[in-house]
Amino acid sequence: MYRGGLASSRAQARQFVCHGLLTVNGRKVDIPSFTTKVGDVISVRQSRREMEHFKIVKEGVNRVIPKWLTTNAADLSTTVNALPQRDDIDLTLQENMIVEFYSR
């Protein structure tokens, strides 16, 4: 939800998921660690689309959406086009430092 622009923060996205506002491929999801696959469609449940937050999102997503996702603001849905690659991650981290830390 956060990366697709349907939530303004990661905490808000997690709360939306926990409260059951989401569907993945038409099935209700309330587990924040739910794993999506390529081709999955994440959308807001029909009964929750009239919430004030989602009315603002329908007017237009004001965030940069990663290239591996496609968001339809009018439909309040996000489609997973591909799995993110290393270049798509916007965090600066050194994987070798993580491996060294956990190899002790």
Image: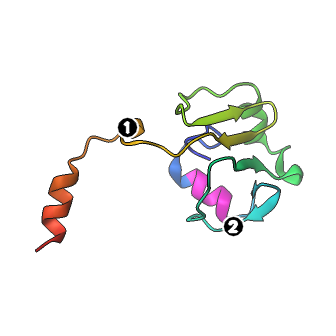
Q: Disc 2 vs disc 1: Cβ atoms closer than 8 Å? A: no
- Distance between the Cα atoms at labels 2 and 1? 26 Å
Name the image quarter holding residue 88.
top left
Magenta stretch holds residue 70? no
The reply, left or right, for residue 75 in relation to residue 64 is: right
Identify the residue position indicated by label 2 in the image: 30
* Residue under the point 36% across and 42% down: 86
> Which element type, helix, strand or loop, lies under badge 1?
loop
First in sequence, mark 2 or 1: give its number. Answer: 2
Name the image quarter holding residue 14.
bottom right
Residue range corresponding to the magenta coloring: 12-18
Magenta stretch holds residue 14? yes
> Which element type, helix, strand or loop, lies under badge 2?
loop
Q: Which mark is residue 90?
A: 1
Q: Residues within 10 Å of mark 2 (few under 14, many from 20)?
A: some
Question: From the viewer's perspective, is the residue at label 2 or at label 1 nearer?
Answer: 1
The reply, left or right, for residue 11 in relation to residue 98 is: right
Q: Position of residue 20 (x, y in %)?
A: 74, 63
* Residue under the point 89% across and 53% down: 47
Residue type at numbered disc 1: Asp
Labels in figure, total: 2
From this view, report whether residue 30 is shown above or below residue 21: below
- State the residue in front, 53 or 60: 60
Q: Position of residue 53 (x, y in %)?
A: 72, 41
Q: Which mark is residue 50?
A: none
From this view, report whether residue 51 is shown above or below residue 71: below
Residue type at numbered disc 2: Asp
From this view, report whether residue 24 is shown above or below residue 69: below
* Residue under the point 86% across and 43% down: 50
* Residue under the point 33% across and 41% down: 91
